[in-house]
Image: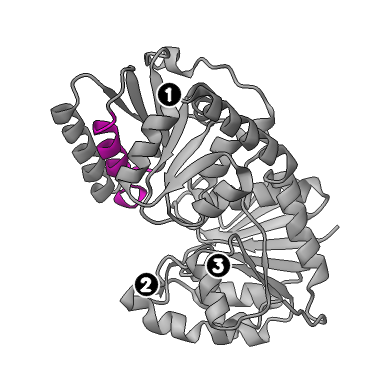
């Protein structure tokens, strides 16, 4: 039994991709017999500093926010001392450009524990404000036992190659054990959506970067002799910017769409989201920026064929899973979608490939074991050659 610390900007009850990955890792590390602690932000005032979520899962929340570029607010020394004085066997820092990672860079040489880093895409790499940040970053990355990348083709992987950073491995993302179950295909009747139509699903938080507007443009030009529904499921956000974006989407929908139906669903529980995956015909993904999106793995795991813009490493996931098609540009995606909708045999093949790849490789039970192998293999005393 080992004691593992995972450092991430946000965790439960916050909702998001990083939170989901960390939760899956923690759950599966627990199932393998290890104790896990999460070091994260105290993003809500009523959350305690320390909390025991289960017998083997603890959360430590620091009142710290931001990153090196926007500015870090809070008592950083409290977090740094916590790391330096801790006796964890393994420390995993999940994602760059956030305070749990950025605060460690000044003390990285002092950290004696086995420490690992998953960069998660380097979303700010092309942002001029982050130029100095990324110009200095290579000098720090060699101090980690190893760097865990989710892709060989996205910008973070290219950054590592261009800077000749050798201590790295590939571990993909995955989908959870919940997809081993069969869910009732009752989502659409309960939400008063015509299940006899072709139902196209998009699961993403409502924000400009997620590109729901691009899905709507594609849907507008999708002219086939079938009834069509486009269903968005997204996390309800209190941000004014995201509220205005969702309002904009609804207004253009009301103006342009008379014979097609678009649904904007919020506050949908996880069970219903899984039912939506199981009930839909095609998953569409038009995000503007991603690293390795979980929803693509989840669509594949549920047997829902996906069609996506070439964002993040979705093209790579398509090759791995054989569960969907990827295109450069919305009109190439549109033409492919028109053909795919009427090709029942192709849809069935994509569905079967997705389920097969999930069961064989891309489930969190197997992926989590890869992390544990890396933790055990690449310790401080080992010399790692890529």
Q: Are marks 2 and 3 in contact (CB under 8 Å)?
A: no
Q: Is residue 355 above or below residue 166?
A: above
Left or right for 186, reference 355: left
Q: Which residues are magenta?
A: 205-222
Which residue is identified by label 3? 119
Query: Could you tell me residue 28's position as x and y percent?
Result: 73, 47
Q: How is the image coloured?
A: one colour
| Quarter placement of the N terminus | bottom right
- Residue 206: say if magenta: yes
| Nearest to N terminus: mark 1 or mark 2 | 2
Question: Magenta: predominant secondary structure element?
Answer: helix
Which residue is identified by label 2? 126
Q: Kindly identify the residue that appears in the image at 24 percent across and 44 percent down.
A: 245
Left or right for 381, reference 247: right
| Nearest to N terminus: mark 1 or mark 3 | 3
Where on the picture, by quarter, is residue 384?
Answer: bottom right
Q: Kindly identify the residue that appears in the image at 45 percent across and 80 percent down.
A: 134
Which residue is identified by label 1? 342
Q: Is residue 1 above or below residue 89?
A: above
Between the residue at mark 2 and the residue at mark 3, the CA separation in whole angstroms equals: 15 Å
> Which mark is nearer the camera, 2 or 3?
2
User: Which sits in the foreground, 248 or 103?
Assistant: 248
Left or right for 290, reference 369: left
Query: Could you tell me residue 336's position as x and y percent?
Result: 39, 38
User: Which sits in the foreground, 165 or 341?
Assistant: 341
- Residue 140: say if magenta: no
> Which mark is nearer the camera, 1 or 3?
1
> What secondary structure is marked by label 1?
loop
Q: Is residue 72 above or below residue 10?
A: below
């Amino acid at each position: 039994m080992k004691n593992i610390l995972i450092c991430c900007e946000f965790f439960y009850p916050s909702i998001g991709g990083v939170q989901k990955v960390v939760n899956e890792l923690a759950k599966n590390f627990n199932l393998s017999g290890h104790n896990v602690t999460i070091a994260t932000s105290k993003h809500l005032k009523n959350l305690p500093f320390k909390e025991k979520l289960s017998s083997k899962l603890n959360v430590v929340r620091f009142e710290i926010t931001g990153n090196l570029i926007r500015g870090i607010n809070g008592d950083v020394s409290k977090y740094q001392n916590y790391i330096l004085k801790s006796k964890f066997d393994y420390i995993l820092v999940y994602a760059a450009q956030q305070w749990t990672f950025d605060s460690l860079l000044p003390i990285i040489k002092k950290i004696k524990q086995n420490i690992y880093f998953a960069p998660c895409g380097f979303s700010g790499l092309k942002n001029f404000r982050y130029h100095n940040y990324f110009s200095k970053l290579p000098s720090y990355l060699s101090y980690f036992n190893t760097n865990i990348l989710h892709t060989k083709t996205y910008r973070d992987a290219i950054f590592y190659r261009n800077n000749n950073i050798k201590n790295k491995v590939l571990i993909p993302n995955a989908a959870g054990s919940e997809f081993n179950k069969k869910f009732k295909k009752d989502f659409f009747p309960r939400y008063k959506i015509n299940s006899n139509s072709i139902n196209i699903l998009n699961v993403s938080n409502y924000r400009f970067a997620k590109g729901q507007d691009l899905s709507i443009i594609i849907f507008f030009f999708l002219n086939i002799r079938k009834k069509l529904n486009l269903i968005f499921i997204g996390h309800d956000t209190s941000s004014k910017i995201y509220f205005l974006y969702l309002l904009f989407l609804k207004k253009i929908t009301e103006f342009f769409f008379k014979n097609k139906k678009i649904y904007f669903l919020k506050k949908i529980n996880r069970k219903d989201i899984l039912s939506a995956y199981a009930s839909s015909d095609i998953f569409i993904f038009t995000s503007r920026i991603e690293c390795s999106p979980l929803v693509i793995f989840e669509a594949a795991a549920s047997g829902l064929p996906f069609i996506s813009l070439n964002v993040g490493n979705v093209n790579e996931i398509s090759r791995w899973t054989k569960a969907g098609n990827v295109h450069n540009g919305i009109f190439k995606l549109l033409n492919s979608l028109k053909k795919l909708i009427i090709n029942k045999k192709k849809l069935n093949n994509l569905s079967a490939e997705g389920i097969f790849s999930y069961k064989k490789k891309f489930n969190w039970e197997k992926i989590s074991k890869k992390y544990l192998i890396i933790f055990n293999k690449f310790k401080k005393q080992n010399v790692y050659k890529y």
